[in-house]
Amino acid sequence: MNTSPPTVVLVYQRTTLPWVFDSAERAGIRLILVPRPDEDVAPDRLPPAVSGVLRLDVDGDRAGALAALRRRYESTPFQGICTLYDPLVPFVAEAAELLGLPGIGRDAALGAQDKRVMRERLAAAGLHVPRFVRLEDPGGWEEAAHLDFPVVVKPAHGFSSLGVAKVDRPERLKAAVEEVWQICREKLGRIEGLVVEEYLDGPEFAVESLVHRGEVTVCTIGYKGEPEGPYFEESVYRAPAVLPAAVEDAVRREVTAAHTALGITDGPTHTELRLRGGERPYLLELGARIGGSGVSQYIVQHVTGRDFAADALRIAAGLPPLSFGGGRIPAATGAAANYIVPCGGSGRIAVVHGLAELHDDPRVDHVVQMLFPGDVVRPYPDFTGYPAFVLSRHTTTAEAETFHRTLETAIGVEYTPEGSGR
Ligand code: ADP
Ligand code: CA
Ligand code: CA
Ligand code: CA
């Protein structure tokens, strides 16, 4: 009998974001960590679940990275490979296919990543889709001028809302398309096209799901605020969302059908959607991965009391999930939230107020600071990142909302006055 623990290659996960590593440890799953190329990982400070490190340069040498994975697999076999980093979902799907490991396959990965393909597949399945136009080059903007305004212009392969812009009038479309194109070229490194789609009015939600052999279980639905643009910063995440039963059911059905339409049969997913008129779910996108670099694990764990990432890693290793299944949304046992500290300006950061105090707050489990005094925040539409996340636990979602209101005034980023310092 083979009693050695299952081993999964985890690609491009930062060790500073601990949740998925903690789940692996609890689930008895070993990880071979592929660090981000820009991350130094000290061998003595690795999370306990990590049994090995493998450096790959996927962007620089994709074929070399695949070859290195094959060599590793042939010398010391592993049972699965996964990533929480959206741009690498297609790479991981390809690697799994080549090595004969569990995965969603290259074609499903394409549909989960390319917003043009996603929109086409959802529309073909009769799901709710805003009217949209795909642009292969910025000169094609006129094709999108007949859409109902406002519209949203976004890169086909974007992430983190980079280059996503709302345009209110047709007269502004040409300039906006050119601007988004420019941002894509500079920031995404590659540009394969844009989507222009009608603006979806309504509150935004994130849905965390787990799929096993085609059966989709929605684990949690969380409220994501109601950002109105013109640029779309992340702000809050509070789960479980308080929704009428019929609306919750509509969300569950739409999200489940989207998995089928996109051919995503196994693994965790993170779906973003808006409720038009407060009740009709329209997908924004569906990522074939655990969301928020692991924040989704924190949310699901504390809303349901069950280990989402452990099940996700089990599925990656070809094992059945232990905690989720059956297609029904589990009853909530608590509420969990993420407050994303807004940049609130641009320039060189002098100080971030209000974070140190939170370490002693019993509701707060993690303060993840990503920008520090001295860092430079460039103005939108450029994207530098977020100053910090505050992850907290509450008895109800209403309490989480009250807590977030206090954070809005307690936390602030101060910038160095123009001309001082450097
Ligand atoms: P990304 O992959 O960069 O996250 P998204 O499609 O999720 O791209 O867009 C980022 C954000 O922009 C969304 O969370 C949403 O707030 C807003 N957004 C995108 N498309 C639309 C739309 N059609 N209507 C309204 N808001 C949108
Ligand atoms: Ca995305
Ligand atoms: Ca998104
Ligand atoms: Ca988002």
Image (cartoon, rainbow, N blue to C red):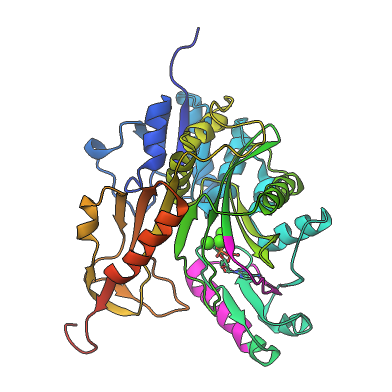
| Image quadrant assignment for residue 211 | top right
Q: Which residues are magenta?
A: 175-204
What residue is at 35 percent from the left and 31 percent from the top? 49
**Picture quarter with ligand 1:** bottom right
Q: Position of residue 231 (x, y in %)?
A: 52, 76
Give 210 or 331, whichever is nearer the viewer. 331
Q: How many marks?
A: 0
| Image quadrant assignment for residue 154 | bottom right
Give 414 or 347, whichever is nearer the viewer. 414
Task: Note whether 36 is above or below 388 in the view shown.
Answer: above
| Image quadrant assignment for residue 230 | bottom right
Q: Position of residue 57 (x, y in %)?
A: 44, 50
Q: Position of residue 135 (x, y in %)?
A: 71, 74
Residue 201 forms part of the magenta stretch: yes
Give 415 or 384, whichever is nearer the viewer. 415
Residue 60 seen by the camera: no
In the image, taking residue 277 as reference, residue 410 lies left or right, namely left
Q: Position of residue 292 (x, y in %)?
A: 47, 53
What residue is at 71 percent from the left and 82 percent from the top? 149
